[in-house]
C-alpha cells in the first residue's frame, strides 16, 4: 500500500477525473463475483481476485496541452468559510451567513504527528451526497397527514427538492479541487435515499439531476399542482393563499405563484465528475418502509384519489404501526386507506408514479439517457441484473477501492441489515484486496441495522446486524472508512476492530436543514499514519432569500430557508464540531 500521489505532483499527469470519465473500466466488480473487465455477462460469475495494476500515465504521453499548476488548499464554497444560519428572533426566521465551522483533529485511533501537513500525499478525494429525498409531493401514496400527530411528518419545502438538489450539483461542480490538499476530485458517490417514495417519477428526476437535463418536477395534471399545499387544509402551509393556516400563524409568508413556480421546468447541468449510486430504503420500498407486493397499494399510487387528512388519533395509530415495525407489508395503511375512500380528494391519475422494483432501479441506471460523464450504470452492471443484486465494487483511485453495499431489508421497515451472501462476498472482496485500501459505502449506519426480517426472495437466508458488519470490517486491516447516511445527522465514530481500525462517517441529509454534503480526502502522512479529512458543503444557493424571486435559484434558496423553519433541531442534525469538518487520524496498515 505504498503508492500514492503527492499533493504537489498530482497536476503533472492527466487529471484522474478525465481518465475516469473517458473509460468504462472504472467498475471492477458487481453483485456476486468480480468483473476486472470481462464482458458484462461474465461479471456475476467471475471469482474474486485482485485487479490488474492500472497503467502509469506520464505527463509526456497524457497531453500536449499546458498543465495547470496545483491548486492551493482553499475554503471557498465550503462550511469552513461560512454557513447558513437563522437570524435571531422567534417565529419564522430568515437566513443569513454565519462564521464557518473550524476543522477538528481527532486522535481517537492514532496520534497526530507534527509536520505531517508538509509530508502528506493524496490517496483519494471525492464528494459524498446522501439522503437527497427527491419528492413527488403530489403522489397519492404519501404520509403528509401524519403531521396531525407529529409536526415533523410533513415538510413545507417538499415541492422544491429538485431545485435544491440541482443547486447542490452546481456547488459540487464549482469545487476546483479538494479543500485540504488541493488535489483533483475523483468522483461523487451517493449513499442512498436518492428518491423518497420509490416512484418512477422520482427516479427519473434523480437520474436527470445527476446526469444533466431538463426536469419538470410535476406529476398528475401537467397544468397545475394537486396536493396538500392548495387543499385549504390549515394543517399545511397554503403558500399561495392568504388563509391563516398553522404555518402562517408561525410567520410563514404568503407567496403568490409559489406552486406554479415549483412545478416549472428545471435545468440541471449534471455532475462534471463520474458518479456512483448506492441504494437506500426509500429507493427500495414505497415510503421507505413497506415491502413490495401489495397490488392494491400499487394501484392506489397511480390512481385518481388521494387522502390528505386524518384525525390526530388516527395519525398517531398509523405512526406507531410504522415506528414500532408493526406493518412491514403495508396491511395497516392499506386497510386505513380503504376505509377512507369517501374522505379522499380527486387528483389526476399518473402511471409514472408506479413503484419501481430493484431490477428496474438497476436498469434505469444502465439507461444511456442517464449516463452523463459516466461510468455506464454508475456502479451497477448487467451482472447485477443477472444476479439480482445491488452491491458492487469500483476503483476509487490507484490502490484504493470502493465497496457499495445494499443494506436495505426487502422484508419491510426503514432500518436495515445485510444478507449472508452479501456478507460473505464482502469478506471475500476485502481478502482479495488485502493490499489495497478499502472505503465502504452504504445507506444505513452501524446503529441503524437492527432489522433482521427475512428477505421474501430468500426466506432461508440469515440477515445480519450492524454490529456484525462492524465486526467483519474490523477484521480487515485495509478498511479505512465506512461512509453512510440514513440518520440525517452528522456523526463520526471511531471503530477499533480485531485486526484494524477505521472511521465511520455519517453525513446529514440534503432534505433537512442544514442541508449538507461532504468532501472526503484520504492522505498518507508518511509517518505510519493516514488521515481522512472531511469538509462539509452546502448548495450553491445564496443564504439570503427574496420572497419575490421565484426563479430556479431563488427557489433553491427558499428550499434551504423553509427547511430551517420546518423543524427546530437543525443544531442537532448538524452534529457536534467533531462530526463536521475534521481530520481523522488512523494507523497505516
Image (cartoon, helix red, strand yellow):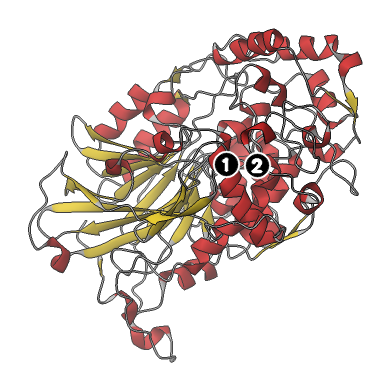
Name above or below for residue 402 compared with residue 315.
below
Specify the quadrant that holds the N terminus. Answer: bottom left
Q: CA distance from mark 2 to mark 1?
A: 6 Å
**Rendering quarter of residue 82:** bottom left
On the rendered structure, is 81 left or right of 485? Answer: left
Residue at figure coordinates x 77%, y 11% from the top left: 336
Name above or below for residue 487 compared with residue 96.
above
Residue tagged 2:
157
Residue at figure coordinates x 78%, y 9% from the top left: 335
**SS category of the residue bearing label 1:** helix
On the rendered structure, is 380 left or right of 79? Answer: right
Residue 281 % position (x, y): 57, 30
Q: Is mark 2 in CB contact (under 8 Å) with mark 1?
A: yes
Q: Nearer the viewer, residue 567 or 79?
A: 567
Residue 569 % position (x, y): 46, 33
Crowding at dot 1, Cα within 10 Å, few <14 / some 14-19 / many 20+, comes out as many
Q: Is residue 150 among the parts visible in the rendering?
A: yes
Residue tagged 1:
563
Label disc, if present, on residue 63 of the rendered structure: none
Q: Nearer the viewer, residue 566 or 171?
A: 566
Q: How many marks?
A: 2
Q: Nearer the viewer, residue 529 or 49?
A: 529
**Rendering quarter of residue 292:** top right
**SS category of the residue bearing label 2:** loop
Residue at figure coordinates x 68%, y 56% from the top left: 208
Residue 478 % position (x, y): 25, 44
Residue at figure coordinates x 65%, y 30% from the top left: 154
On the rendered structure, is 429 left or right of 560? Answer: left
Q: Is residue 24 among the parts visible in the rendering?
A: no
Name above or below for residue 541 compared with residue 508.
below
Which of the two labelled residues, at mark 2 and mark 1, occupies the earlier sequence position? Answer: 2
Name above or below for residue 75 compared with residue 498.
below
Amino acid at each position: 500500500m505504498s503508492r500514492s500521489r503527492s499533493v504537489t505532483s498530482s497536476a503533472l499527469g492527466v487529471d484522474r477525473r478525465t481518465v475516469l470519465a473517458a473509460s468504462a473500466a472504472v467498475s471492477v466488480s458487481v453483485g456476486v463475483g468480480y468483473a476486472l473487465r470481462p464482458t458484462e455477462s461474465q461479471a456475476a460469475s467471475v471469482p474474486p481476485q485482485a485487479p490488474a495494476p492500472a497503467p502509469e500515465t506520464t505527463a509526456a504521453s497524457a497531453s500536449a496541452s499546458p498543465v495547470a499548476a496545483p491548486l492551493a488548499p482553499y475554503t471557498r464554497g465550503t462550511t469552513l468559510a461560512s454557513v447558513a444560519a437563522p437570524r435571531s428572533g422567534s417565529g419564522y426566521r430568515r437566513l443569513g451567513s454565519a462564521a464557518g465551522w473550524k476543522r477538528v483533529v481527532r486522535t481517537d485511533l492514532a496520534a497526530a504527528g507534527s509536520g505531517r501537513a508538509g509530508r502528506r500525499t493524496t490517496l483519494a478525494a471525492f464528494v459524498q451526497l446522501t439522503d437527497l429525498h427527491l419528492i413527488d409531493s403530489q403522489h397519492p401514496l404519501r404520509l403528509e397527514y401524519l403531521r396531525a400527530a407529529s409536526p415533523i411528518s410533513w415538510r413545507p419545502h417538499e415541492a422544491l427538492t429538485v431545485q435544491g438538489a440541482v443547486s447542490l450539483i452546481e456547488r459540487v461542480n464549482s469545487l476546483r479541487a479538494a479543500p485540504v490538499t488541493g488535489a483533483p476530485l475523483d468522483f461523487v458517490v451517493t449513499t442512498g435515499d436518492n428518491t423518497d417514495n420509490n416512484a418512477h417519477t422520482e427516479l427519473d428526476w434523480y437520474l436527470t439531476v445527476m446526469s444533466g437535463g431538463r426536469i419538470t418536477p410535476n406529476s398528475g395534471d401537467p397544468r397545475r399542482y394537486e396536493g396538500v399545499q392548495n387543499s385549504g387544509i390549515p394543517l399545511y402551509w397554503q403558500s399561495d393563499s392568504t388563509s391563516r393556516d398553522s404555518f402562517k400563524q408561525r410567520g410563514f409568508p404568503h407567496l403568490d405563484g409559489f406552486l406554479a413556480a415549483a412545478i416549472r421546468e428545471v435545468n440541471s447541468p449534471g455532475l462534471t465528475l463520474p458518479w456512483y449510486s448506492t441504494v437506500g430504503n426509500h429507493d427500495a420500498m414505497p415510503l421507505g418502509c413497506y415491502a413490495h407486493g401489495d397490488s392494491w397499494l400499487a394501484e392506489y399510487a397511480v390512481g385518481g384519489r388521494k387522502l390528505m387528512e386524518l384525525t390526530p388519533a388516527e395519525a398517531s395509530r398509523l405512526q406507531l404501526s410504522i415506528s414500532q415495525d408493526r406493518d412491514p407489508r403495508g396491511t395497516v395503511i392499506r386497510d386505513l386507506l380503504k376505509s377512507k375512500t369517501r374522505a379522499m380528494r380527486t387528483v389526476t391519475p399518473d402511471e409514472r408514479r408506479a413503484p419501481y422494483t430493484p431490477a428496474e432501479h438497476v436498469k434505469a441506471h444502465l439507461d444511456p439517457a442517464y449516463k452523463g460523464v459516466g461510468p455506464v450504470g454508475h456502479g451497477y452492471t448487467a451482472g447485477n441484473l443477472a444476479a439480482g443484486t445491488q452491491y458492487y465494487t469500483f476503483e476509487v483511485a490507484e490502490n484504493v477501492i470502493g465497496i457499495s453495499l445494499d443494506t436495505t431489508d426487502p422484508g419491510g421497515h426503514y432500518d436495515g441489515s445485510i444478507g449472508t451472501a452479501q456478507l460473505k462476498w464482502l469478506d471475500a472482496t476485502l481478502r482479495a484486496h488485502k493490499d489495497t485500501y478499502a472505503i465502504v459505502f452504504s445507506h444505513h449506519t452501524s446503529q441503524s441495522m437492527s432489522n433482521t426480517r427475512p428477505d421474501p426472495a430468500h426466506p432461508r437466508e440469515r440477515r445480519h446486524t450492524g454490529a456484525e458488519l462492524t465486526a467483519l470490517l474490523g477484521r480487515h486491516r485495509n478498511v479505512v472508512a465506512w461512509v453512510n447516511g440514513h440518520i440525517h445527522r452528522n456523526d463520526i465514530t471511531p471503530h477499533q476492530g480485531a485486526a484494524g481500525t477505521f472511521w465511520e462517517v455519517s453525513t446529514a441529509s440534503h432534505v433537512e436543514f442544514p442541508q449538507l454534503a461532504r468532501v472526503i480526502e484520504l492522505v498518507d502522512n508518511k509517518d505510519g499514519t493516514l488521515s481522512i479529512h472531511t469538509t462539509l458543503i452546502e448548495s450553491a444557493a445564496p443564504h439570503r432569500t427574496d420572497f419575490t424571486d421565484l426563479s430556479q435559484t431563488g427557489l433553491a434558496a427558499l428550499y434551504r430557508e423553509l427547511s430551517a423553519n420546518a423543524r427546530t433541531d437543525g443544531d442537532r442534525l448538524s452534529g457536534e464540531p467533531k462530526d463536521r469538518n475534521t481530520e481523522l487520524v488512523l494507523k497505516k496498515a
